[in-house]
Amino acid sequence: MSASEERIRSEVRRLAETLAPALGLEVVEVVFHRAGRFTQVRVDIDRPGTPGVTLEDCQRMTEALGPALDATELLEPRYNLEVSSPGLDRPIRTEDDVRRNRGRRVEVDVATPVAGSRHLTGELLGMAEGALHVLLDGGEKVLLPRENVVLARQEITVSRAKERGNRVV
């Protein structure tokens, strides 16, 4: 990324981070990509706790950020703005990731078994002493040192609609 592209990305992030708190959101990442005459700006947002980002959150941020970007003349008149969630399967790596996912159900794969397993699920309570603090499904609270964590991410649950007769409700 060139210096001017990095400057644009930084300015978009600064502007998005200025607007996000009033909407109850946080900016996770800003991606700027230019290919010829095509300019793409993607802003990933999150909402701490559950349920996380909704489609309405993305729409509200788009409605706030689009006009603000236009007013700066930072970008060419034609650009594509995409506001989205960072995704459920995004790894939890940083302290900010831990803070944003506190209270959410997580899956954690560990190198050395904990409570007899290398794959743990439960509620992320936070971070303490450089370790993830998780309330396991069985009710046990564990500290998982970061060096033992292979992968941590929000648990993805898919609920199925109940069938009644010939219709799905």
Image: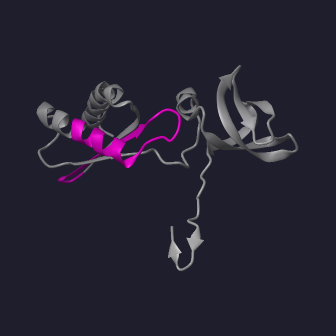
Judge whether residue 62 is colored magenta: yes
Kindly tell me whether residue 57 is visible in this rendering: yes
Percent x, y for residue 24?
Answer: 38, 30
Q: Nearer the viewer, residue 42 or 155?
A: 155
Residue sitting at x 42%, y 45%: 85
Locate residue 90, reporting x and y percent. 54, 45
Question: With 154 as the anchor, is 77 left or right in this view?
Answer: left
Residue 166 sits above or below residue 54 on the image: below
Looking at the image, residue 112 sits to the left or right of residue 23; the answer is right
Query: What is the residue that sits farthest to the right in this orientation?
Result: 116
Of residues 120 and 11, the one nearer the viewer is: 120
Q: Residue 79 or 6: which is nearer the viewer?
A: 79
Question: Residue lying furthest front in this view?
Answer: 165
Residue sitting at x 22%, y 41%? 63
At horizontal 57% and vertical 73% (from top left) the residue drawn is 164
Residue lying farthest bottom? 166
Q: Compared with residue 15, is residue 37 higher up or lower down, i.e. above or below?
A: below
When the figure is inspected, residue 67 is found, relative to residue 88, above or below; the finding is above
- Residue 15 in which image quadrant: top left
Determine if the magenta segment contains residue 89. Answer: no
Highlighted range, magenta: 35-64
- Measured as percent of width and height from the top left, residue 160 is found at 58, 64
Q: Nearer the viewer, residue 156 or 33?
A: 156
Q: What's the residue at 62%, 48% (across, down)?
A: 155
Residue 68, located in which quarter of the rendered image? top left
The answer to whether residue 42 shows anywhere in this view is no
